[in-house]
Image: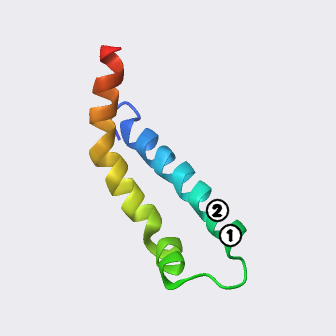
Amino acid sequence: MLDMRLTFRMALIALIAYWAAFGVIVARRPDSPTRGDMLFVRYGYLLLLAGVCVAAPFAWRALRRL
């Protein structure tokens, strides 16, 4: 992809956030995850990736102003 690694950066941010949240879920309820936990494990990365793709340009623009 010729987007100067922007897509890779957004995917990496979403991946790190996903695994951090997954670790919290496993640490808090290892034996009895809730239905919401299971939905997050299944679809959480896609939701985080969509959120990062929307929020990242605004965050990078705000950080450039500092």
Per the image, the residue denoted by label 1 is 28
Residue projecting furthest to the top: 66
Which secondary structure lies at badge 2?
A: helix
Residue 7 percent coordinates (x, y)? 38, 43
Residue 65 percent coordinates (x, y)? 30, 15
Q: Is residue 20 left or right of residue 6?
A: right
Residue 6 percent coordinates (x, y)? 37, 36
Pick the quarter of the image with the N terminus: top left
Q: Nearer the viewer, residue 43 or 33?
A: 33
Which secondary structure lies at badge 1?
A: helix
Pick the quarter of the image with the C terminus: top left
Mark 2 neighbour density, 10 Å: few (under 14) some (14–19) many (20 or more) = few
Mark 1 neighbour density, 10 Å: few (under 14) some (14–19) many (20 or more) = few
Q: Quadrant of residue 49?
A: bottom left
Q: Disc 1 residue type?
A: Arg
Dot 2 and dot 1 residues touching (CB under 8 Å)? yes
Q: Quadrant of residue 32?
A: bottom right
**Residue 3 seen in the figure:** no
Q: Residue at x 55, y 83 (%)?
A: 34
Per the image, the residue denoted by label 2 is 24
Q: Disc 2 residue type?
A: Val
Q: Is residue 65 left or right of residue 37?
A: left
Q: Nearer the viewer, residue 12 or 30?
A: 30
Q: Is residue 26 left or right of residue 34?
A: right
Residue 13 percent coordinates (x, y)? 48, 44
Label 2 and label 1: CA atoms lie apart by 6 Å
Residue projecting furthest to the front: 28
Q: Find residue 54 and name its label.
A: none
Q: Residue at x 50, y 85 (%)?
A: 35
